[in-house]
Amino acid sequence: MRNADYLLISDFFSDGTSLSLSIAKELRGKIFLIASEHISFIRRLIDEYELAGRVILFATRPWEEGIYIINLLNLNDISIAVSKILEKDSGIFIFTIIPELLMIHGLEKTYMFLHNTITKIRAVNGCTLAVINSHTVTKKEEKILQKLFSNTIFVKRRGEKREIHLEYPAEIKHEISFEGLKVDSKEIMKILEKI
């Protein structure tokens, strides 16, 4: 799964963020989480997946010490932060800031930023996971963003269960269960490893 990139589209934003951390946990390397969610939510997920010490967090506000601050108004700021990491390290990059970038910068600039960033991450054999909520982006934005990624994972809620849909190479449907915010991605990883 190295040198791969996935766009996770969920009905509920927390489902996509949780699934991305669950997938990242199964991979080797540091996890660079570039997030817009509140720190209490992020800390809860990090605790749920026992990822303390493995996640390096970039946030839009200085919630607490040890968090790197990014400026959503400046795409160069985010790009420089990613480039500095890639000079020294590779790993798993999780972006949950895409809806905010679309609102601030529009589709064209966000697309170019993501294209350049994903290309840099691929070049060092890293992995990119990006999360959007199906209710925060238009269908046009969703379809265009999908073209940047090697695969798209859809997460849909069906009562207490969640259904996962992968589009490539053929549509695969798989039901998973969440316990609170936590999801067991072992079955999903088996599918992803075959792709």
Image (tube, rainbow, N blue to C red):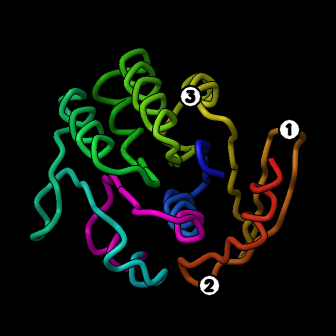
Report the span colored magenta: 23-45
Q: In whole angstroms, how far apart are the C-alphas of marks 2 and 1? A: 29 Å
The answer to whether residue 158 is above or below residue 128 is below
Name the residue rendered at 25%, 54% in the picture: 58
Q: Are marks 2 and 3 in contact (CB under 8 Å)?
A: no
Name the residue rendered at 49%, 80% in the picture: 49
Q: Tell me which amino acid carries mark 2.
A: Glu
Q: Tell me which amino acid carries mark 3.
A: Leu
Q: How many marks?
A: 3
Choose the circle earlier in sequence order: 2 or 3.
3
Which residue position holds label 3?
Answer: 145
Residue 111 lies within the magenta run: no
Task: Rate crowding at label 1 as few (under 14), some (14 to 19) or many (20 or more) other CA atoms within 10 Å.
Answer: few
Q: Tell me which amino acid carries mark 1.
A: Pro
Task: Rate crowding at label 3 as few (under 14), some (14 to 19) or many (20 or more) other CA atoms within 10 Å.
Answer: some
Name the residue rendered at 28%, 64% in the picture: 38
Q: In whole angstroms, how far apart are the C-alphas of marks 1 and 3? A: 18 Å
Q: Nearer the viewer, residue 135 or 191?
A: 191
Choose the circle earlier in sequence order: 1 or 3.
3
Q: Could you tell me which secondary element the residue under label 1 belongs to?
A: loop
Q: Nearer the viewer, residue 160 or 116?
A: 116
Image-quadrant location for residue 65: bottom left
Which residue position holds label 2?
Answer: 179
Name the residue rendered at 50%, 57% in the picture: 13
Which residue position holds label 1?
Answer: 169
Choose the circle earlier in sequence order: 2 or 1.
1
- Mark 1 or 3: in front is 1
Q: Nearer the viewer, residue 93 or 7?
A: 93
Rendered location of residue 23, percent (x, y): 59, 64
The answer to whether residue 155 is above or below residue 160 is above
